[in-house]
Image (cartoon, rainbow, N blue to C red):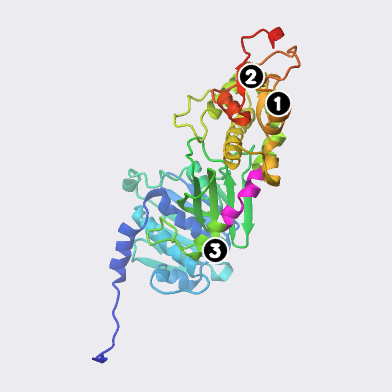
Amino acid sequence: MKAELVETGTFKIDRKRTLKKLRDYQLPAGARGFLSWIRCAAASKAASIVITISKSSLRIEFDGNPFDKKELDDPYRALFSREGERGERNRHFALAMLWAWRAGVESVTILSGADQNRLKLHCESITQETLESAAPGLAETTSNTTIVNLEWSMMRLSMNPVGGLTRAFLAESCALVDSHVALNGEPLEPPADKAWPPYAFRKKELRGTLSIPDDDAKRKGVVALYVWGVYAADITLKSSDFPFKGRLNDNGFKLNASLTKVVQNERLAAGLKELQSRYPDFMRHIALQQLRASKEIGALLIENSRLRSEWKRVFDFDSTNDAPPGPATFPWHLPQSKRMRVHMAARMAAWIRMATETMTIGYSRAPKGELEKTLWRVPLIYDVRGRPVSLERLQREDKGPRIRFSTVRRSVYTRPDWIVWAMTRRDELWLQRVGKRTTINVTKIPERAW
């Protein structure tokens, strides 16, 4: 039976009801929802984003492309119709506005545009808006930046609506934002270890970083996905051979309706494939950082017992350890840079040990290829004088049937015989696996008997 067209028509959407539903049920609450403002600013091609939080207000100021009259006249337009080249920016603007109402603001005021085209939008509810030309003469109205002011009533302040917007949260969430971001007048520091910068890469619109995982990382690769440089969600690559911590940004990634996940499509698959192709360069980066610092780290370990305690604490908790790490014994009387360098060197050494053992199937074969040979030259342990020891040196200088080690360091008068300094409880087992030889603990044996 052939279908017959009887009638055509249209239907209307109740905007007010729809916006309230989106506000109450779709968007993430708290600090996560605020990130739409940062995406909006980043999508405006802002070079600077300044966030100021006071007791009863929150202010976001950014440069870049301003809002025009059409965009401010209907802040939620992008949620109901397709936009032009600024459509993505306007969608984040609409979502940011909805978050503000969900956070219980009393009013939202936006100033945007330059000179005679500068406009002021004042909103007292999700449907009550006033748009007018900005009054001339005031500092805020003569500026060319976009200024967003969110105001809370004293009653709402008891809910602590912006309590989660801490410096640490924003630094992690805005880790890949190209703009300069500041909170209360102070720039956000990137969430990376200064002594050991992560491996960074960029390919057209795709950019990201790779670093060794946190102390509690299991045997997997976790990638934090970002859109417009702002954190969106985590994804685990179960096929990864080595644990790592990654960040990946593509402004073309699509967020789901609730802004809590990135849609799995061809764009995301291509981005993850590019990230995985960077593994060899990432390993070379880690090896070079460790190689450069090895002599200094050995001297620091000789110098201070509390630094040695930090090395042991971190090193004994690597990716193959199921037990929680021991309590921190940070040497607070020393410059933080020393503690951080020792801390990171221990994490690097544990990670490279795991990588080399995996690559050679439990050290059952010699290293192959330039990458493996490079890793074999990286210091992974020290001798009793604090001299760095690599896999290459370990196998070259101690070719006998036994590997001698000591759990304590020796004075400068130690005999020249080559003794490995096994500072952690995992070192002896690792030394046995490396050479398939018997290890001898010479800690309590007189030096003349070595």
Q: Measuring 69% from the left and 46% from the top, which residue is drawn there?
A: 369
- The local crowd at label 1, few if under 14, some if 14 to 19, many if 20 or more residues have their Cα within 10 Å, is few
Q: Measuring 50% from the left and 41% from the top, which residue is drawn there?
A: 168
Q: Nearer the viewer, residue 179 or 218?
A: 218
Label 3 sits on residue: 44
- Give the magenta-colored segment's residue range: 274-285
| Residue 438 at x, y percent in the picture | 60, 22
Label 1 sits on residue: 399
Q: Quadrant of residue 255?
A: bottom left
The main secondary structure of the magenta stretch is helix
Q: Measuring 54% from the left and 65% from the top, which residue is drawn there?
A: 136
Q: Tell me the amino acid under the disc marked 2.
A: Phe
- Name the mark nearer the viewer: 1 or 2: 1
Q: Earlier in the sequence, mark 2 or mark 3?
A: 3
- The local crowd at label 3, few if under 14, some if 14 to 19, many if 20 or more residues have their Cα within 10 Å, is many
Q: Tell me the amino acid under the disc marked 1.
A: Lys
- Name the mark nearer the viewer: 2 or 3: 2
Label 2 sits on residue: 405
Residue 319: assigned label: none
